[in-house]
Image (cartoon, rainbow, N blue to C red):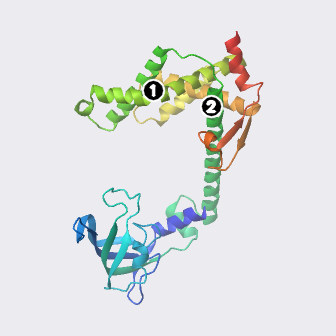
C-alpha cells in the first residue's frame, strides 16, 4: 500500500530546476550522450541507438546498463564526463552483449522531484475518496481481494495438476485434433480482432506450426475436462439453469457489442467455467492444499503454481480411478 501511494506521489511530483548542487539519486536530468564501442580494428566508433540529445532520464537504480546512472550522480551542470562501462552478457542486442563501451555524457539540466503531501487533498486528486484514510482502506481491501483471488487460482491450478496426474484414460486422436484446431482458430480470431490481415501472412506452414505448438495444450485441456467431468459425475455436481442465466446476463452486460460473439458458444463456455469452479470448490473442501512460498518447491514440483497438493487417497484420485473399474 505504501509503495502504491509513493508511486502516485512520484507520478504527480513537481520538477524544480536545480543549479546550486550536483546531481543526486532521485533527480530527473537532461543529458546529451554518445556511446562508442571498439570495431574490428580496435578503434572506437558510435553504434546505432547509442547516442541522444536532450535525453530525459530519472536517476533511479537499474536504469539502462550498470554504472550509467551511477556515473551521472555527482556530476555538475554543464559538466562533461566519459564513462567506461560494459554491456551485460545477457544484453538484448547480441552484437553489444559483453562488450566494453565508452559513453561521453554532458549534463544539461538537473531537476529535483518535489512530492505532494500525502493528505486528504491528495486522495481527492487521485481517487474518488474524500480522505486519505478512506483511500488507504480501499487499497487494503483491494490487495486483500487480489491476494485471495491469487490464492484461489493457485489452489485450483494445483488441484487440476493433481487430477491430471492421476488420470488414466486414452484420449482419441480425433478429440485431440478437434481441440487443437479449436485453439488455433481461437488464436487466429484474436489476431483478426487486433486488426491483422490474415490473408497477408497466413500460410500452410504457419498453420502447421501453430497446430504443433497448440497440441500439448490441447491434450492437457482435454485431460482436465475428462478428470473434472468424472468428479462431477461421481459427486453429482452440476450447474443449474438459473446459475447459468445469471452469469450469462452479467457477461452480456459487460460486452460492448454482444452481436460480435457467438452467444451459443459463449453460453457453453460460461457453463464450463461455472462447473469447473463448482468442482474445484468442492475439491478444496475434501483435499489438503498446502500453500508454500513462491520458488520454494523442489525442481520436479515447480510446475505446480505456488501450491503443493496433498490429495486424500479416498477422494479426487480414487474418484477418477473408480471410473476405470466400472
Q: Position of residue 236 (x, y in %)?
A: 70, 18
Q: Nearer the viewer, residue 1 or 26?
A: 26
Give the residue displayed 61% in from the left and 36% down from the top: 157
* Residue 236 seen from this side: no
Return the disc, 1 or 2, that comes first in the chain's sequence: 2
Q: Nearer the viewer, residue 89 or 165?
A: 89
The quadrant of the picture occupied by the N terminus is bottom right
To which residue does mark 1 refer? 215
Residue at the extreme top of the image, as rendered: 326
What residue is shown at x 52% (from left), y 59% (from top)? 127
Q: Residues within 10 Å of mark 1 (few under 14, many from 20)?
A: some
**Occupied quadrant, residue 64:** bottom left
Q: Secondary structure at mark 1?
A: helix
Residue 208 vertical placement versus 16 (above, below): above
Q: From what the image shows, is residue 213 above or below residue 27?
A: above
Q: For mark 2, what is the residue? A: 160
Q: Mark 1 against mark 2, which lies toward the viewer?
A: 1
Q: Position of residue 326 (x, y in %)?
A: 70, 9
Amino acid at each position: 500500500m505504501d509503495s502504491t501511494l509513493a508511486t502516485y506521489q512520484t507520478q504527480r511530483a513537481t520538477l524544480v530546476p536545480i543549479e546550486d548542487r550536483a546531481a543526486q539519486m532521485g533527480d530527473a536530468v537532461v543529458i546529451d550522450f554518445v556511446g562508442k564501442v571498439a570495431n574490428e580494428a580496435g578503434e572506437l566508433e558510435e553504434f546505432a541507438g547509442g547516442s541522444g540529445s536532450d535525453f530525459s532520464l530519472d536517476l533511479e537504480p537499474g536504469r539502462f546498463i550498470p554504472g550509467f546512472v551511477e556515473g551521472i550522480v555527482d556530476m555538475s551542470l554543464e559538466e562533461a564526463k566519459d564513462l567506461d562501462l560494459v554491456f551485460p552478457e545477457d544484453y538484448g542486442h547480441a552484437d553489444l552483449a559483453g562488450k566494453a563501451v565508452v559513453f561521453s555524457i554532458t549534463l544539461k539540466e538537473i531537476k529535483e522531484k518535489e512530492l505532494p503531501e500525502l493528505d486528504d487533498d491528495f486522495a481527492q486528486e487521485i481517487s474518488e475518496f474524500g480522505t486519505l484514510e478512506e483511500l488507504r482502506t480501499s487499497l487494503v481491501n483491494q490487495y486483500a481481494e487480489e491476494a485471495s483471488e491469487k490464492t484461489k487460482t493457485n489452489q485450483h491450478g494445483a488441484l487440476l495438476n493433481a487430477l491430471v496426474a492421476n488420470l488414466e484414460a486414452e484420449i482419441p486422436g480425433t478429440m485431440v485434433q478437434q481441440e487443437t484446431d479449436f485453439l488455433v482458430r481461437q488464436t487466429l480470431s484474436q489476431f483478426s480482432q487486433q486488426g491483422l490481415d490474415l490473408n497477408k501472412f497466413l500460410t500452410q506452414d504457419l498453420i502447421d506450426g501453430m497446430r504443433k505448438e497448440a497440441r500439448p495444450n490441447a491434450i492437457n485441456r482435454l485431460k482436465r475436462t475428462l478428470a473434472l467431468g468424472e468428479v462431477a459425475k461421481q459427486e453429482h455436481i452440476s450447474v443449474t439453469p438459473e446459475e447459468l442465466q445469471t452469469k450469462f446476463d452479467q457477461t452480456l452486460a459487460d460486452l460492448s457489442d454482444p452481436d460480435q460473439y457467438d452467444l451459443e458458444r459463449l453460453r457453453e463456455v460460461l457453463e464450463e467455467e461455472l462447473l469447473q469452479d463448482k468442482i474445484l470448490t468442492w475439491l478444496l473442501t475434501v483435499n489438503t492444499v498446502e500453500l508454500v512460498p513462491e520458488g520454494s518447491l523442489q525442481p520436479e514440483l515447480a510446475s505446480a503454481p505456488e501450491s503443493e497438493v496433498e490429495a486424500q487417497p479416498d477422494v479426487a484420485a480414487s474418484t477418477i480411478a473408480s471410473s476405470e473399474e466400472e
